[in-house]
Image (cartoon, rainbow, N blue to C red):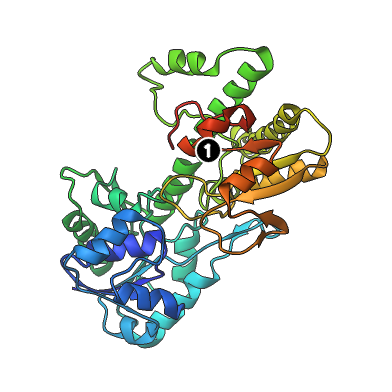
Amino acid sequence: MVISIAGTGYVGLSNAIILARHNTVYAVDIIPEKVEMINNKKSPISDKEIEEYLANAKLDLTATTDGESAYSKSDLVVISTPTNYDDEKNYFDTSSVEAVIEQVLKVNPNAVMIVKSTVPVGYTMSVREKYNTENIIFSPEFLREGRALYDNLYPSRIIVGAPEGNERVTAAAHKFAELLKQGAIKEDIPVLFLDPTEAEAVKLFSNTYLALRVSYFNELDTYAQMKGLDAKQIIEGVGLDPRIGSHYNNPSFGYGGYCLPKDTKQLLANYNGVPEEIIRAIVSANGTRKQFIADSIIKKAGKANPVVGIYRLIMKANSDNFRQSAIQTVMALLGEQGAQIVIYEPTLSQDEFCGYKVVHDFGEFVQMSDVIAANRMSDELNPFADKVYTRDIYFRD
């Protein structure tokens, strides 16, 4: 089968790899440098597993900037382009998705399009009506940055959303699920076929629950700090209940990254006219936590107008993504309290980031800093632990 993947970020590239194990795949991107890297078996994103797979696996994968050519010869087109959240419109910016839909309809209207970009609830049915085509379905992704390929090879579930009534499209939905299973290593993968609107809701509610869990353990940690208690002991006691468990429980400076902030806001926007309290509280709690962290860093510095060293902007290991990282909001809040910010981030080559000084030498960074804020601890910080403010209890995630 010939498949095109529109977008080569974490979602698109990891899907391209697993599908190219058994199919002819074209990875389409508008950035020539990314296309060149993929064709040279190099990863344009920071993910060790993807880098190794591209370098060593036998894949029928070609990257191109010529979307129309790729789409014209494809049976399926997987759309995994970015959908950033627009705070003014309270809606995902889905323009990149629709640009691909328009291209596909122009050159190959019979191709079935599978949207994997995260979209508002009800979006798939709305674009089917807008473009007067039944050849659009939805399949949510459940991938972690830095582990995207692993999560495709060992998926928690496969969900495909296609409305009933069109045998050809229903068959394509089942075929796509089979292709994902074929590309995976894990066996006995749960597969669900839903209406696309329900599938969209699964995606947003899943990520919002994860944000809720992060916020819950963060607020537990805030309580422990304020009351002089050992947060780790409390968390471990709570987690021994098998209904709660010991996963996704490591306190942080707040949830961030590309998915959770925008997905929680979009779900809250979708609640317009629907009674709710929890969803709004999740969004609000994250802001409260970041303010508490900023206040705590200033308190640890123990002086007015301290130099606060920010150790790493990335959200997690094996990632190069700073987008919506919680530390960036914390930096702004620290600045409002008179702190001078310096950053140590080895993935940055420039000397400035968002108006803040970037220090490339770790020793110089430590010496300059009155206090070092680290969302996640690292061995290289251990000798300077007396300067470090972190809420990383388990040294993971």
Residue at image location 48% in from the left, 55% down from the top: 320
Is 344 positioned to the left or the right of 170 in the image? right
* Rendered location of residue 87, percent (x, y): 68, 56
Residue at image location 75% in from the left, 27% down from the top: 299
* Rendered location of residue 282, percent (x, y): 60, 36
User: Can residue 380 be seen here?
Assistant: yes
Does 346 appear above or below 38?
A: above
Residue at image location 31% in from the left, 61% down from the top: 51
Q: Tell me where residue 178 sits by quadrant.
A: bottom left
Q: Amino acid at mark 1?
A: Ala
Is 161 positioned to the left or the right of 212 in the image? left
Q: Tell me where residue 92 sits by quadrant.
A: bottom right
Regarding mark 1 in the picture, which secondary structure is present there?
A: helix
User: Can residue 330 be seen here?
Assistant: no
Is 359 positioned to the left or the right of 66 in the image? right
Residue at image location 64% in from the left, 19% down from the top: 225
Pick the front one: 110 or 117: 117
* Rendered location of residue 236, percent (x, y): 44, 16
Quadrant containing the N terminus in the rendered view: bottom left
Pick the front one: 64 or 341: 341
Is 263 positioned to the left or the right of 236 in the image? right
Does 31 appear above or below 170?
A: below
> To which residue does mark 1 refer?
211
